[in-house]
């Protein structure tokens, strides 16, 4: 009989502990389903230039002289801007590129897109001489075509290209 009482006491203690652990949390908890403040459940979707980002693990790329293009892939983020594109630059000028993730059209010529946090593009280096070049990729976003937004810190990525 003692064993049964002891077992019942242990079971009741465990059950009580489980109920206490499932009790309501403090008012400042992130785990709330309160309907009194629906704005507390929405993410801020305001576009932010600080969230523009482009990077790649390919910091140094070497290609033979015969190559007419160089391909590069990496990570990117376009914040929540409705429109964005990636451009390739050398000495301040825009380079010809092809987005390897989309079909080439007049609207996408020389521009690539960030898709699911990744980009893949090919830059035209046809006719370039043997040598070393510093190229730059830049993420450009905009709310309207006349309001371009960039991030000069995380929204630019430089890499070295060696043509041998």
Image (cartoon, rainbow, N blue to C red):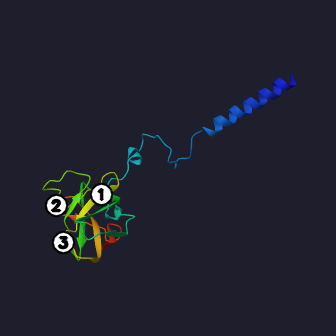
Residue receiving disc 1? 120
- Quarter containing the C terminus: bottom left
Which secondary structure, mark 2?
loop
Q: Residue at x 37, y 63 (%)?
A: 56
In front: 60, or 141? 60
In front: 34, or 146? 146
Q: Residue at x 24, y 60 (%)?
A: 85
Residue receiving disc 3? 127
Q: Nearer the viewer, mark 3 or mark 2?
A: 3
Image quarter for residue 86?
bottom left
Q: Residue at x 56, y 46 (%)?
A: 26
Q: Of all residues shown, which one is farthest toward the top?
A: 1
Q: Residue at x 65, y 35 (%)?
A: 18
Whole-number angstrom distance, CA of label 3 to CA of label 2: 33 Å
Residue 111 image point, x, y percent: 21, 60
Whole-number angstrom distance, CA of label 3 to CA of label 1: 22 Å
In front: 4, or 124? 124
Whole-number angstrom distance, CA of label 2 to CA of label 1: 24 Å
Image quarter for residue 35?
top left
Residue 44 image point, x, y percent: 36, 53
Among the two numbered marks 2 and 1 on one chain, the one whose residue lies closer to the N terminus: 1
Among the two numbered marks 3 and 1 on one chain, the one whose residue lies closer to the N terminus: 1
């Amino acid at each position: 009989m003692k064993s049964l009482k002891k077992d019942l006491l242990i079971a009741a203690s465990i059950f009580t502990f489980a109920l206490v652990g499932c009790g309501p949390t403090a008012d400042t908890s992130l785990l709330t389903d309160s309907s009194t403040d629906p704005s507390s459940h929405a993410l801020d979707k305001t576009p932010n230039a600080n969230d523009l980002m482009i990077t790649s693990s390919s910091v140094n790329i070497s290609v033979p002289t015969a190559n007419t293009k160089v391909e590069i892939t990496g990570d990117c983020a376009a914040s929540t801007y409705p429109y964005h594109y990636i451009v390739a630059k050398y000495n301040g000028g825009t380079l010809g590129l092809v987005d390897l993730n989309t079909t080439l059209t007049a609207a996408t010529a020389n521009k690539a897109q960030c898709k699911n946090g990744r980009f893949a593009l090919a830059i035209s280096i046809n006719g370039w001489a043997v040598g070393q070049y510093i190229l730059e990729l830049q993420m450009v976003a905009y709310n309207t075509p006349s309001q371009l937004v960039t991030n000069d810190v995380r929204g630019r990525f430089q890499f070295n290209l060696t043509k041998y």
